[in-house]
Image (cartoon, rainbow, N blue to C red):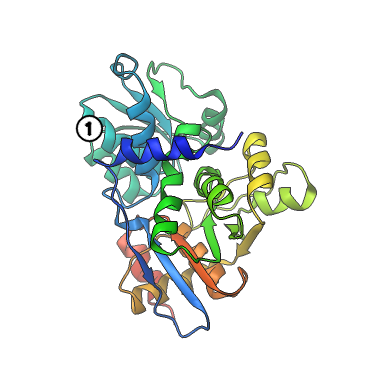
Protein backbone atom coordinates (compact mmCIF):
# COMPACT_ATOMS: atom_id res chain seq x y z
CA UNK A 1 0.00 0.00 0.00
CA UNK A 2 1.25 3.54 -0.75
CA UNK A 3 2.13 5.70 2.19
CA UNK A 4 -0.54 8.14 3.34
CA UNK A 5 -0.48 11.91 3.58
CA UNK A 6 -0.92 11.58 7.33
CA UNK A 7 2.28 9.52 7.53
CA UNK A 8 4.18 12.13 5.53
CA UNK A 9 2.86 15.04 7.59
CA UNK A 10 3.92 13.22 10.74
CA UNK A 11 7.34 12.59 9.19
CA UNK A 12 7.74 16.30 8.50
CA UNK A 13 7.33 17.00 12.20
CA UNK A 14 9.62 14.12 13.14
CA UNK A 15 12.55 15.29 11.02
CA UNK A 16 12.19 19.07 11.41
CA UNK A 17 15.09 19.36 13.83
CA UNK A 18 17.42 17.19 11.71
CA UNK A 19 16.77 17.67 7.99
CA UNK A 20 16.76 20.96 6.12
CA UNK A 21 13.94 22.30 3.99
CA UNK A 22 16.05 22.47 0.85
CA UNK A 23 15.77 25.20 -1.80
CA UNK A 24 14.23 24.82 -5.23
CA UNK A 25 16.18 26.82 -7.84
CA UNK A 26 16.10 27.32 -11.58
CA UNK A 27 18.79 25.49 -13.51
CA UNK A 28 20.74 28.07 -15.50
CA UNK A 29 20.51 26.33 -18.85
CA UNK A 30 19.87 27.61 -22.36
CA UNK A 31 17.46 24.77 -23.07
CA UNK A 32 13.80 25.62 -23.68
CA UNK A 33 11.34 25.22 -20.83
CA UNK A 34 11.90 25.56 -17.13
CA UNK A 35 14.12 23.13 -15.28
CA UNK A 36 14.20 23.39 -11.49
CA UNK A 37 16.65 21.71 -9.14
CA UNK A 38 15.57 20.45 -5.70
CA UNK A 39 18.86 20.69 -3.84
CA UNK A 40 18.99 17.73 -1.47
CA UNK A 41 22.77 17.85 -1.82
CA UNK A 42 22.61 20.69 0.73
CA UNK A 43 21.41 18.41 3.53
CA UNK A 44 23.79 18.03 6.53
CA UNK A 45 25.00 14.71 5.09
CA UNK A 46 24.88 15.87 1.46
CA UNK A 47 21.93 13.62 0.60
CA UNK A 48 18.15 13.21 0.94
CA UNK A 49 18.74 10.00 2.90
CA UNK A 50 18.78 11.93 6.16
CA UNK A 51 15.00 12.36 5.86
CA UNK A 52 14.14 8.68 5.90
CA UNK A 53 16.77 7.75 8.47
CA UNK A 54 15.61 10.47 10.85
CA UNK A 55 11.95 9.48 10.52
CA UNK A 56 12.56 5.79 11.18
CA UNK A 57 14.65 6.51 14.24
CA UNK A 58 12.12 9.03 15.57
CA UNK A 59 9.36 6.44 15.28
CA UNK A 60 11.34 3.59 16.85
CA UNK A 61 10.97 3.17 20.64
CA UNK A 62 14.12 4.24 22.42
CA UNK A 63 14.58 0.85 24.06
CA UNK A 64 14.83 -0.77 20.62
CA UNK A 65 17.54 1.69 19.61
CA UNK A 66 19.73 1.22 22.66
CA UNK A 67 21.53 -1.77 21.14
CA UNK A 68 22.32 0.33 18.09
CA UNK A 69 21.26 0.55 14.46
CA UNK A 70 22.28 -1.38 11.35
CA UNK A 71 21.87 -0.59 7.68
CA UNK A 72 23.11 -1.76 4.29
CA UNK A 73 24.28 1.10 2.10
CA UNK A 74 26.80 2.11 -0.52
CA UNK A 75 27.24 5.42 1.24
CA UNK A 76 24.35 7.88 1.54
CA UNK A 77 21.92 5.97 3.76
CA UNK A 78 24.97 4.93 5.75
CA UNK A 79 25.69 8.59 6.40
CA UNK A 80 22.08 9.33 7.28
CA UNK A 81 21.95 6.53 9.82
CA UNK A 82 25.38 7.35 11.26
CA UNK A 83 24.51 11.06 11.56
CA UNK A 84 21.26 10.37 13.41
CA UNK A 85 22.87 7.70 15.60
CA UNK A 86 25.59 10.13 16.69
CA UNK A 87 22.93 12.70 17.65
CA UNK A 88 21.18 10.06 19.76
CA UNK A 89 24.34 8.64 21.30
CA UNK A 90 23.91 5.10 19.97
CA UNK A 91 26.22 2.91 17.83
CA UNK A 92 25.74 2.48 14.08
CA UNK A 93 26.98 -0.43 11.96
CA UNK A 94 27.07 -0.15 8.17
CA UNK A 95 27.24 -3.07 5.73
CA UNK A 96 28.82 -1.64 2.58
CA UNK A 97 29.77 -3.24 -0.75
CA UNK A 98 33.44 -3.49 -1.61
CA UNK A 99 32.75 -1.10 -4.50
CA UNK A 100 31.51 1.68 -2.18
CA UNK A 101 33.31 4.99 -2.87
CA UNK A 102 36.05 5.82 -0.38
CA UNK A 103 34.78 9.38 0.12
CA UNK A 104 31.42 8.13 1.39
CA UNK A 105 33.00 5.51 3.64
CA UNK A 106 35.31 8.11 5.17
CA UNK A 107 32.32 10.35 5.85
CA UNK A 108 30.52 7.55 7.69
CA UNK A 109 33.58 6.85 9.81
CA UNK A 110 33.95 10.57 10.67
CA UNK A 111 30.43 10.37 12.09
CA UNK A 112 31.41 7.43 14.27
CA UNK A 113 29.84 4.67 12.19
CA UNK A 114 31.43 1.22 12.00
CA UNK A 115 31.75 0.05 8.38
CA UNK A 116 31.92 -3.61 7.34
CA UNK A 117 32.84 -3.93 3.65
CA UNK A 118 31.62 -7.16 2.04
CA UNK A 119 31.30 -8.62 -1.49
CA UNK A 120 28.50 -7.08 -3.58
CA UNK A 121 26.34 -10.23 -3.48
CA UNK A 122 26.59 -10.45 0.33
CA UNK A 123 25.74 -6.76 0.62
CA UNK A 124 22.70 -7.13 -1.63
CA UNK A 125 21.52 -10.15 0.34
CA UNK A 126 21.40 -8.00 3.48
CA UNK A 127 18.52 -6.00 1.98
CA UNK A 128 16.48 -9.19 1.89
CA UNK A 129 17.46 -10.67 5.24
CA UNK A 130 17.33 -7.29 7.02
CA UNK A 131 20.07 -8.48 9.33
CA UNK A 132 23.76 -9.34 9.40
CA UNK A 133 25.42 -12.21 11.25
CA UNK A 134 26.95 -11.15 14.54
CA UNK A 135 25.26 -7.73 14.67
CA UNK A 136 22.36 -7.37 17.11
CA UNK A 137 20.84 -4.00 16.22
CA UNK A 138 17.73 -2.33 14.83
CA UNK A 139 17.85 -2.74 11.04
CA UNK A 140 16.99 0.33 8.98
CA UNK A 141 16.21 -0.50 5.37
CA UNK A 142 17.55 2.00 2.87
CA UNK A 143 14.37 2.08 0.78
CA UNK A 144 11.80 -0.67 1.46
CA UNK A 145 10.30 0.78 4.63
CA UNK A 146 7.12 2.88 4.95
CA UNK A 147 8.76 5.22 7.45
CA UNK A 148 11.73 5.78 5.13
CA UNK A 149 9.40 6.50 2.21
CA UNK A 150 7.29 8.82 4.36
CA UNK A 151 10.43 10.77 5.23
CA UNK A 152 11.30 10.99 1.55
CA UNK A 153 7.75 12.05 0.78
CA UNK A 154 8.29 15.29 2.69
CA UNK A 155 10.21 16.45 -0.39
CA UNK A 156 6.94 16.39 -2.34
CA UNK A 157 5.20 18.57 0.26
CA UNK A 158 7.93 21.17 -0.16
CA UNK A 159 7.75 20.99 -3.95
CA UNK A 160 4.02 21.64 -3.98
CA UNK A 161 4.40 24.58 -1.61
CA UNK A 162 7.26 26.15 -3.60
CA UNK A 163 6.02 25.34 -7.13
CA UNK A 164 2.34 24.39 -7.03
CA UNK A 165 2.01 24.42 -10.83
CA UNK A 166 4.88 22.01 -11.51
CA UNK A 167 4.31 19.61 -14.42
CA UNK A 168 6.97 16.90 -14.13
CA UNK A 169 9.28 15.43 -11.51
CA UNK A 170 12.29 13.27 -12.41
CA UNK A 171 13.82 11.21 -9.60
CA UNK A 172 16.94 9.03 -9.43
CA UNK A 173 16.00 5.37 -8.92
CA UNK A 174 18.17 3.33 -6.58
CA UNK A 175 15.98 1.01 -4.56
CA UNK A 176 12.84 3.05 -5.18
CA UNK A 177 12.27 4.59 -1.76
CA UNK A 178 12.80 8.15 -2.99
CA UNK A 179 10.70 7.80 -6.14
CA UNK A 180 7.83 5.99 -4.43
CA UNK A 181 7.83 8.30 -1.42
CA UNK A 182 7.59 11.42 -3.55
CA UNK A 183 5.13 9.85 -5.98
CA UNK A 184 2.78 8.68 -3.22
CA UNK A 185 2.27 12.29 -2.14
CA UNK A 186 1.96 13.72 -5.65
CA UNK A 187 -0.59 11.09 -6.71
CA UNK A 188 -2.80 12.17 -3.82
CA UNK A 189 -2.18 15.92 -3.89
CA UNK A 190 -1.42 16.63 -7.58
CA UNK A 191 -2.38 13.63 -9.73
CA UNK A 192 -1.84 15.58 -12.97
CA UNK A 193 1.94 15.73 -12.35
CA UNK A 194 4.00 13.31 -14.43
CA UNK A 195 6.54 11.36 -12.39
CA UNK A 196 9.53 9.52 -13.83
CA UNK A 197 12.26 7.45 -12.27
CA UNK A 198 15.72 7.87 -13.83
CA UNK A 199 18.35 5.16 -14.21
CA UNK A 200 21.84 4.86 -15.63
CA UNK A 201 22.51 2.70 -18.69
CA UNK A 202 24.97 0.48 -16.81
CA UNK A 203 22.33 -0.63 -14.27
CA UNK A 204 18.70 -0.05 -15.21
CA UNK A 205 16.57 -2.89 -13.82
CA UNK A 206 13.38 -0.84 -13.39
CA UNK A 207 13.15 0.07 -17.08
CA UNK A 208 13.66 -3.57 -18.03
CA UNK A 209 11.12 -4.73 -15.44
CA UNK A 210 8.46 -2.22 -16.50
CA UNK A 211 8.93 -3.26 -20.13
CA UNK A 212 8.54 -6.93 -19.21
CA UNK A 213 5.68 -6.39 -16.78
CA UNK A 214 7.55 -8.22 -14.03
CA UNK A 215 10.82 -7.90 -12.11
CA UNK A 216 13.85 -8.66 -14.24
CA UNK A 217 17.56 -9.04 -13.50
CA UNK A 218 20.03 -7.06 -15.60
CA UNK A 219 23.78 -6.86 -15.88
CA UNK A 220 25.35 -4.45 -13.40
CA UNK A 221 28.48 -2.45 -14.23
CA UNK A 222 30.02 -0.23 -11.52
CA UNK A 223 30.67 3.39 -12.54
CA UNK A 224 30.97 6.88 -11.06
CA UNK A 225 27.17 6.73 -10.72
CA UNK A 226 27.37 4.84 -7.44
CA UNK A 227 24.29 6.16 -5.62
CA UNK A 228 21.85 4.29 -7.88
CA UNK A 229 21.92 1.14 -9.96
CA UNK A 230 21.63 -2.55 -9.13
CA UNK A 231 20.97 -5.91 -10.74
CA UNK A 232 17.28 -6.14 -9.89
CA UNK A 233 14.19 -4.47 -8.45
CA UNK A 234 12.66 -5.84 -5.27
CA UNK A 235 9.22 -7.30 -6.20
CA UNK A 236 7.26 -5.15 -3.72
CA UNK A 237 9.09 -2.01 -4.86
CA UNK A 238 8.29 -2.94 -8.46
CA UNK A 239 4.60 -3.16 -7.61
CA UNK A 240 4.71 0.24 -5.94
CA UNK A 241 6.56 1.77 -8.87
CA UNK A 242 4.21 0.31 -11.44
CA UNK A 243 1.25 1.89 -9.68
CA UNK A 244 2.84 5.26 -8.97
CA UNK A 245 5.27 6.17 -11.75
CA UNK A 246 4.83 7.11 -15.40
CA UNK A 247 7.95 5.20 -16.39
CA UNK A 248 11.72 5.02 -16.08
CA UNK A 249 14.06 7.14 -18.18
CA UNK A 250 17.55 5.81 -18.90
CA UNK A 251 20.56 8.08 -19.45
CA UNK A 252 24.11 7.38 -20.56
CA UNK A 253 27.28 7.87 -18.56
CA UNK A 254 28.27 10.63 -20.96
CA UNK A 255 24.97 12.44 -20.44
CA UNK A 256 25.33 12.16 -16.66
CA UNK A 257 28.87 13.57 -16.75
CA UNK A 258 27.76 16.44 -18.99
CA UNK A 259 24.89 17.27 -16.61
CA UNK A 260 27.32 17.24 -13.70
CA UNK A 261 29.53 19.70 -15.55
CA UNK A 262 26.64 21.97 -16.55
CA UNK A 263 25.27 22.47 -13.04
CA UNK A 264 28.80 23.02 -11.71
CA UNK A 265 29.47 25.71 -14.32
CA UNK A 266 26.05 27.37 -14.43
CA UNK A 267 24.73 26.98 -10.88
CA UNK A 268 27.97 26.40 -8.97
CA UNK A 269 26.49 23.19 -7.54
CA UNK A 270 28.32 19.91 -6.95
CA UNK A 271 26.18 16.86 -7.67
CA UNK A 272 27.01 13.18 -7.51
CA UNK A 273 26.39 10.78 -10.37
CA UNK A 274 22.92 9.68 -9.28
CA UNK A 275 21.67 13.25 -9.03
CA UNK A 276 23.26 14.10 -12.36
CA UNK A 277 21.16 11.38 -14.00
CA UNK A 278 17.93 13.17 -13.09
CA UNK A 279 19.26 16.44 -14.46
CA UNK A 280 20.50 14.70 -17.61
CA UNK A 281 17.11 13.13 -18.35
CA UNK A 282 15.42 16.52 -18.03
CA UNK A 283 18.02 18.29 -20.18
CA UNK A 284 17.63 15.66 -22.90
CA UNK A 285 13.89 16.38 -23.05
CA UNK A 286 12.92 12.80 -22.16
CA UNK A 287 10.63 13.96 -19.37
CA UNK A 288 8.63 16.23 -21.65
CA UNK A 289 7.95 19.94 -21.42
CA UNK A 290 6.64 22.41 -18.89
CA UNK A 291 7.94 23.07 -15.42
CA UNK A 292 10.23 20.12 -14.74
CA UNK A 293 11.82 19.43 -11.36
CA UNK A 294 14.94 17.27 -11.11
CA UNK A 295 15.56 15.86 -7.65
CA UNK A 296 19.24 16.53 -6.92
CA UNK A 297 19.43 13.59 -4.55
CA UNK A 298 22.97 14.14 -3.32
CA UNK A 299 26.38 15.72 -3.78
CA UNK A 300 28.65 13.12 -2.20
CA UNK A 301 31.33 12.53 -4.78
CA UNK A 302 35.09 12.30 -4.43
CA UNK A 303 36.48 15.70 -5.38
CA UNK A 304 39.23 14.26 -7.57
CA UNK A 305 36.64 12.22 -9.50
CA UNK A 306 34.36 15.26 -9.76
CA UNK A 307 37.19 17.41 -11.11
CA UNK A 308 38.08 14.73 -13.64
CA UNK A 309 34.50 14.46 -14.90
CA UNK A 310 33.71 18.18 -15.12
CA UNK A 311 37.01 18.99 -16.82
CA UNK A 312 36.12 16.89 -19.86
CA UNK A 313 35.12 18.97 -22.92
Q: Residue at x 21, y 33 (%)?
A: 87
Q: Dot 1 surroundings within 10 Å: few (below 14), some, or many (20 or more)?
A: some
Point out the image quarter for the C terminus: bottom left
Q: Residue at x 32, y 64 (%)?
A: 304
Q: Is residue 239 left or right of residue 126?
A: right
Res 224 seen here:
no
Q: Which secondary structure, mark 1?
A: helix
The residue that appears at 32% across and 61% down in the rendered structure is 23
* Quadrant placement of the N terminus: top right
- Quarter of the rendering containing residue 49: top left
* x and y, in percent, of residue 56 in the image: 39, 30
Q: In this view of the protein, which residue sits in the foreground, 262 or 197?
A: 197
Which is more toward the observer, 63 or 108? 63
Tell me if I can see residue 267 in this picture.
yes
Image position, residue 16 (x, y; %): 28, 42
Residue 82 vertical placement versus 197 (above, below): above
Residue at numbered disc 1: 86
Q: Residue furthest right?
A: 212
Image position of 137 with respect to 10: above or below: above
Q: Tell me where residue 240 sits by quadrant.
A: top right
Residue 132 spot, x, y in % from top left: 46, 22
Of residues 267 and 101, which is closer to you in this image? 267
Percent position (x, y) of residue 205?
A: 66, 49
**Taking 180 as reference, is 224 above or below it?**
below
| Count of number-bearing discs | 1
User: Residue sitting at 38 percent across and 15 percent down?
Assistant: 136
Amino acid sequence: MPITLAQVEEARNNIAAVALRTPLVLCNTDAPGHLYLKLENLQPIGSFKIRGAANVMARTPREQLQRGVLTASAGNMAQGVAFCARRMGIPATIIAPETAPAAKIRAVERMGGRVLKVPFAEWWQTFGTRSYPGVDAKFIHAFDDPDVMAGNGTIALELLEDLPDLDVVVIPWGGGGLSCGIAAVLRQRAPRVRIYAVEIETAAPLAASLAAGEPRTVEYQPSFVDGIGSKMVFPNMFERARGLLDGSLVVTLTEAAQAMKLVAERNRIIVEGAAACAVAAALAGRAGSGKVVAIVSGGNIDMDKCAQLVSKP
